[in-house]
Image (tube, rainbow, N blue to C red):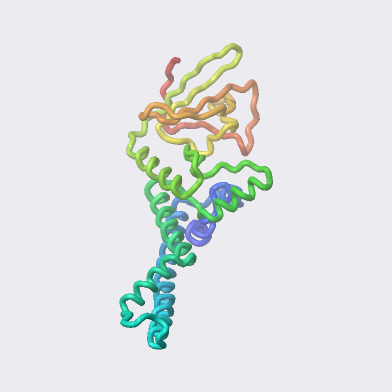
Amino acid sequence: MLTYIVGPFLALLPRRWRKSLPGGASVDWRRATVLSGFGEATVAVIALMYWYSYYMALLVDRGLDSALAGKMRARVTEQEIGFTALVIWATQPLTWVIAFAAIEGAVRLVGAAFTETNLGTFPLFLFGKIFARLSGQSEPSAARAAGYAQGNLFSYVEAIREKAVLRRLVQVPDELFFRADGTEEFLEIRASRQKEDWTPPRTVRYQDTFYRLEGSSSGMLARPFRYTLRKLTAGVMGRTVLTYSPEEEPVLAKK
């Protein structure tokens, strides 16, 4: 019930804000984002139609009044007045804002429905970035968390496109590579799917051993996600510790 009533409104928030909300774990963010994106796009389209009807009628009436009053050149036609009004309407900032909301809602809808990319709204995302920068906190963008450097709407679209490509790949078990470097022991995990929230320097628990996530990189297409972990001498379970428990038995390999 929380997913369908409150979830669509909470889905407008950036992902990092949603995770800090109490009860956020009980919300199906994919469905909530689908409903949120659909609602945003629908409301924006209706608003755009209303704005077009209202503003065009206002401009055309003023243009006709000016023509009848002799304030325009002779033989001006209604079509010319209407075209001029359309150009003025299309260049209005409010028109651009509403159109942006319609496009953003469609992008969020498609991203959540087909690639499980649960995006918030770009204005709130931008506000969060500015606030984090002013407060001295580091907040990775949605695009960077997905493996991209840019932080704008175009990077969102690119992230969705790349995730759509990855979804067509056959899901195979992870490959585990254990290696030693002097006194240090490392574990490299090669996966066919990206692991959510695996951002350095998170602590990861695999079986009874704790590791520190040192970094992530891109690899071969079959398993394009690679994670390098350093073994810790000791560790304690906590809220921030990630538990690596793959559904399929991983493949052990040698370096």
Relative placement, left or right, of 219 versus 122 is left
Q: Hey, which residue is sitting farthest front in the picture?
A: 74
Residue 4: x and y, percent?
47, 59
Residue 19: x and y, percent?
57, 47
Q: Is residue 133 above or below residue 45?
A: above
Foreground residue among 244 and 191: 191
Q: Hey, which residue is sitting farthest bottom in the picture?
A: 69
Foreground residue among 152 and 230: 152
The residue lying at 33 percent from left, 34 percent from top is 170
Residue 209: x and y, percent?
58, 24
Residue 78: x and y, percent?
32, 80
Foreground residue among 253 and 64: 64
Q: Hey, which residue is sitting farthest right in the picture?
A: 135
The residue lying at 41 percent from left, 53 percent from top is 107
Q: Quadrant of residue 88?
A: bottom left
Q: Quadrant of the C terminus?
A: top left
The residue lying at 42 percent from left, 83 percent from top is 71
Q: How many marks?
A: 0
